Image (tube, rainbow, N blue to C red):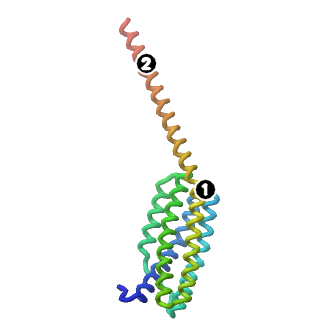
Amino acid sequence: MAAENLQELFVEELKDMYDAEKQLTKALPKMAKATDNPELKAAFEEHLAITRMQVGRLEDVFKSLGMAARGKTCEGMKGLIEEGQGMVEEMDQGSTLDAALISAAQKVEHYEIASYGTLATFAEVLGHEDAKNLLGQTLEEEKEADQKLTIIASQINPEAEDEDQEEAEEGEGSMAAAGSRAGRSSSGSRGRANSRRRR
């Protein structure tokens, strides 16, 4: 149903975020399981607990409006989660995967920051003071989560770069060894051919 006024748009966006947070409660445990980094794993597990509280807070927002909490499929969150899961399935464990997980998580946080910022503004304009305060609390939590991920990324990204360099060096070493073996094999073949010609 298309919203015909700001109040209806506000409610539709609330339903969208209610579903988004529920999707996230299913995705975060998978993200925590995918990393071996203790700090990143703890950050995902901590945010899972916060996300569950945020679901309850949205239910309080609906209650303050005299409505039952109900969601509608949030296609934006669905796409972000699918993108993150795709990276987990395609990459080996290590710092590069951790960097990819942080990237996926921060995309989610930025989506939520934009959404909750808009919802809090709508609530203020519409005079829903309780809703505005509840949504503002969640907005601050999303900003804190994003900052925490940035700090963890500042440690993981250089590790991922070192990991890439080590793999490149190992690859070059393997190519050099293969080239050396090929050279010896070729030299041996020429030697045997020359020997046959001399006979």
N-terminal label among 2 and 1: 1
- State the separation of the CA atoms marked 2 and 1: 47 Å
- Circle on res. 51: none
Q: Residue furthest top?
A: 199
Q: Nearer the viewer, mark 2 or mark 1?
A: 1
Provide residue 5's location: percent of width, then percent of height. Answer: 38, 89
Q: Closest to the observer: 172 or 148?
A: 148
Tell me the amino acid under the disc marked 1: Asp
Q: Quadrant of residue 136?
A: bottom right
Provide residue 177's location: percent of width, then percent of height. Answer: 49, 30
Query: Crowding at label 2, few (<14), some or many (≥20) Cα neighbours within 10 Å?
Result: few
113 is higher (above) or lower (below) than 87: below
Q: Secondary structure at mark 2?
A: helix
57 is higher (above) or lower (below) than 83: below
Tell me the amino acid under the disc marked 2: Ser
- Circle on res. 36: 1
Q: Residue furthest bottom?
A: 66
195 is higher (above) or lower (below) than 109: above
Marks 2,1: beta carbons within 8 A: no
Dividing the image into 4 quarters, which one contains the C terminus? top left
Image side of residue 52 versus residue 15, left or right: right
Q: Quadrant of residue 86?
A: bottom left
Q: Residue furthest front?
A: 125
Q: Secondary structure at mark 1?
A: loop
Tell me the residue at 41%/85% (across/down): 9
Tell me the residue at 47%/58% (across/down): 87
Tell me the residue at 58%/56% (across/down): 154
Provide residue 122's location: percent of width, then percent of height. Answer: 46, 84
Image side of residue 163 versus residue 9, left or right: right
**Residue pointed to by mark 2:** 187
Q: Closest to the observer: 18 or 116?
A: 116
Dividing the image into 4 quarters, which one contains the N terminus? bottom left
